[in-house]
């Protein structure tokens, strides 16, 4: 489901924080989740795509605060 434009960034930043915590957990636990399971192939691809997209956003918009 897509986010409504008036809360898109608010909702997405919460989801990204959740993903960041999950990535940290996977790293701490040697590539498995709290249940000892690895990500599925589809989820592993999505993880890589998410990281690449975050890198692209950072490259285009930088780390500084900009007014749009």
Image (spheres, rainbow, N blue to C red):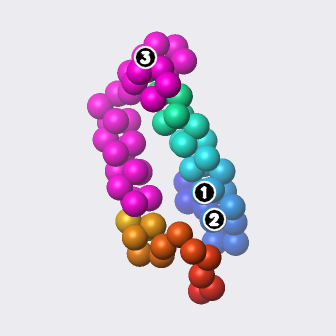
Q: CA distance from mark 3 to mark 2?
A: 31 Å
14 sits left or right of 43 in the view: right
Which of disc 2 and disc 3 is earlier in sequence? Answer: 2
Q: Which residue shows up at 35% across the image and 55% down it?
A: 52
x, y percentage for residue 43?
A: 38, 36
For the residues labelled 3 and 2, say whether their Cβ atoms are less than 8 Å apart.
no
Q: CA distance from mark 1 to mark 2?
A: 5 Å
x, y percentage for residue 40?
A: 35, 27
Identify the element where label 2 is drawn: helix
**Is the residue 52 above or below the residue 56 in the image?**
above
Q: Residues within 10 Å of mark 1 (few under 14, many from 20)?
A: few
Q: Which mark is residue 24?
A: none
For the residues labelled 1 and 2, say whether their Cβ atoms are less than 8 Å apart.
yes
Q: Which residue shows up at 60% across the image and 81% down it?
A: 66
Identify the element where label 3 is drawn: loop
Q: Which residue is mark 2?
A: 9
20 sits left or right of 46 in the view: right
Residue 32 is inside the magenta segment: yes
Quadrant (top left/top right/bottom left/bottom right) for the C terminus = bottom right
x, y percentage for residue 15?
A: 60, 48
Which of disc 1 and disc 3 is earlier in sequence? Answer: 1
Q: Which residue is mark 1?
A: 12
* Towards the viewer: 18 or 3: 18
Q: Residues within 10 Å of mark 3 (few under 14, many from 20)?
A: few
**Is the residue 51 above or below the residue 60 in the image?**
above
Q: Which residue is mark 3?
A: 37
């Amino acid at each position: 489901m897509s986010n409504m434009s008036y809360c898109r960034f608010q909702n997405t930043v919460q989801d990204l924080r959740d993903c960041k915590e999950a990535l940290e957990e996977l790293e701490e636990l040697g590539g498995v989740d709290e249940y000892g399971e690895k990500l599925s192939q589809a989820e592993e691809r999505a993880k890589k795509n998410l990281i690449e997209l975050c890198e692209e956003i950072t490259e285009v918009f930088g780390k500084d605060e900009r007014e749009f």
